[in-house]
Amino acid sequence: MSVKFEEWELKLRELMMFWVTSMANIIQSQTPDKVDFGILQCNVQDHLVFAEQNILDCLGKYFDIGEEHLMEKYKEDFIRRTSSLKQELERYAINKLEESIYIRKYWLKVGFLKEEYMKTIEENLDRLWRDCRRRQQKLDNRELESQFEIMWRKMLSELPFAFSQECAITQEMMFQLTKDLSNRAIVDILTSVSMKTLLNCETKSFPMKQQYLDVPCFKALIPWFTQECYHRLEALAKSLMAKCISYTEAKVRSKAGYDETCFRELLNMVNEWLQEEDVRKLPTTLSFETDLKFHILWKAAYAFQKMNKDFIKGNDPQQHVEQLKPQYLSIFKYLYLEKDSCENRVQDFCDRCLKPALKDYVNNRLGMEIADDFLSRGKSTEHSSRSVFHFTVQKKLLEEMNFDNYVEYINNYEKFVKSWTWRCLLDNYYQSEALEDLEKEILSTIIKKIRDALEMTKDKKTRTVCAFLFHFCEMIQKDLVIPSYSLGGVWALNTTDTESFFACIQSFLPDLEQQILAEFQDLEVESKFSSLSVKPQDEIFKRVFGCGKQCPFCTVPCEADGRHHREHFASVHRPQSLQRFGNSHAKKFHYSLCSTDVLYNDKFQNSDTEWKPHPYKDYRDCYPDWYIQLDPSIVASDYWKFVFKEFNHQFAREYDALPADLPEEWGKITEEQALESIKKSVYDEIAQLVRKSV
């Protein structure tokens, strides 16, 4: 059932992403005042309501043929997952469409200037051509270039170039931050943060400090409470930082100029994170919130400043006009010499308009296609489910027996999984033709759409190239974005026979397709992946990572499907001491497992119990959403017992403790037994779920 649901989920994500891309392309072809965002929102909701109902219908059929007493208990979970998926995709679609409108506003300013400049250039070019044609003496190539150069310099001196001004991004950051913090009476703290600290933010990770925790009543008596909170807070802060960096990188990749909403979005992310239950349980101080926001925003400000400079440089109107000079010189010569310039102009249209639009189309779709290929077509059985994924990772770790990898896996699970998925993708496509096949398939599909659009445009019997291209761009706007300013020089060919222009484009398409494929082939796999708008590693990560919750005792990740379920569980737990803060209250390592502890009257105490001792067997009083499979024999944890006894001294040095006095029988566990224990846990998972329901 879970595997089937994930197939439906992946397909819906794919369809929604492609639909949003089509809508974004249409937005890029229109002025913002013609875009009705209310209608777009309704369209998003209509699409998702239909998709949600379709999945619910499929679920209903599945449950009808299942064992009622076993399936009914999980029906609510799948319905909840469906509703959650709808909400997630709705947020994604609305945010993407808002971003498209925002980007369009930026490019509209740039495009308007470029179109005005090209109009002026073409007017001057037309006058020069007519003047030269009226002369009795025939001009040779050198004289034509000389006349063009004179016209060009005079025109440049008269054009009113408007240069974009750099935004005061640092000042804007301070304004947004002060505004965010003002209602909590901690604005005074802003002035206490040194400029040296801020300047280090752009290159260094967030530095944790003991004063970020407010536990004065326990600090002197039980210092390990503070240490435990410190490490918990550090891990949570690292996770937040990773998300904020990912957001910033996505903004930079959009290639738009800076907008004040960038900082507001980051602050919203931090404020939502601060309200999460895991964070609220920790006794953080006001300085923690202030310093964290400072660090995140200043780091982002550095990236946004560079992004804005690149935007201004890349859209310098004078630089753009200068880049057009060879093109217009060529047009001028062909017009004067009365040569047929159709092939040259079509070549120019293909190189400057179609080619970049086609490459963008491939890059917009390839990421999702890779994820689909990797997950759905048997390319990676190890990502077929979370349980199999956990087993595969642990098996590989066992084969390598690298201590540092185990430390990373245990203490930075999210980062480890992302790195692992990235390496799996690279290995899978590094020397494989599968990636080239996907590119060919995507490009072939859009080339066919172009041919169909050309045929339909031809049937309109347009009289000029200008009208021909206008209709063509309108028909293909859902798939390709071709800015009107990129058509400079082609618009001027209103005397060209549209039949010839059409025939030339059709004949150029095969060569254009091969050129694009050759350019893709020259790129390294890493370069290809970095240019994709949808990152396949992110889509795959969503499948194997799950809800991200970890066991409150040993931090083993939850293996339940989806992000929204009633109970979290893991098939195998591990000794608490293996995590960085799991041994903070003792000088010597202890080796008990929570799956065994919950059977007895031993007690635990932490911030969740308000530092009061609480029986392990009543752990659900504090963690009602966690189900820890009882393991009186602890045979299922042979894997982690083997790892513990192999790296006992290394873990002790890493965590500044004394090695554990492990039971004698642990020393007899072999690598084969360790592997067999986790292999068995994968096979036993369904049986455990059945026992739970019974």
Image (cartoon, rainbow, N blue to C red):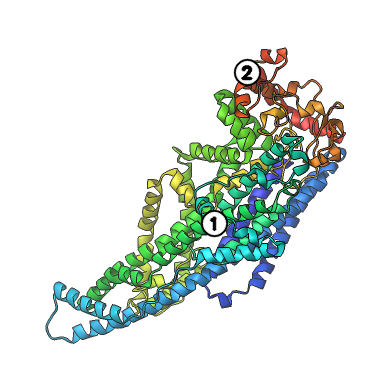
Point out the image quarter for the C terminus: top right
Decide: few, some or many residues near mark 1? Use Cα within 10 Å; few <14, some 14-19, many ≥20.
Answer: many
Where in the figure is residue 241, as x and y percent of width and height? 60, 49
Between 397 and 580, the one lying in front of the other is: 580
Query: Which secondary structure lies at badge 2?
Result: helix
Point out the image quarter for the N terminus: top right
At horizontal 57% and vertical 53% (from top left) the residue drawn is 295
In this rendering, position of residue 379 left or right of residue 680: left
Where in the figure is residue 54, as x and y percent of width and height? 73, 55
In this picture, is 503 found above or below 625?
below
In this rendering, position of residue 432 left or right of residue 407: left
Say which amino acid is labelled 1.
Answer: Trp
Between 3 and 178, the one lying in front of the other is: 178
The residue that disc 1 covers is 298
Where in the figure is residue 130, as x and y percent of width and height? 23, 85
Say which amino acid is labelled 2.
Answer: Glu
The residue that disc 2 covers is 671
In this picture, is 482 found above or below 649?
below
Where in the figure is residue 306, as x and y percent of width and height? 45, 59
In this rendering, position of residue 490 left or right of residue 142: right
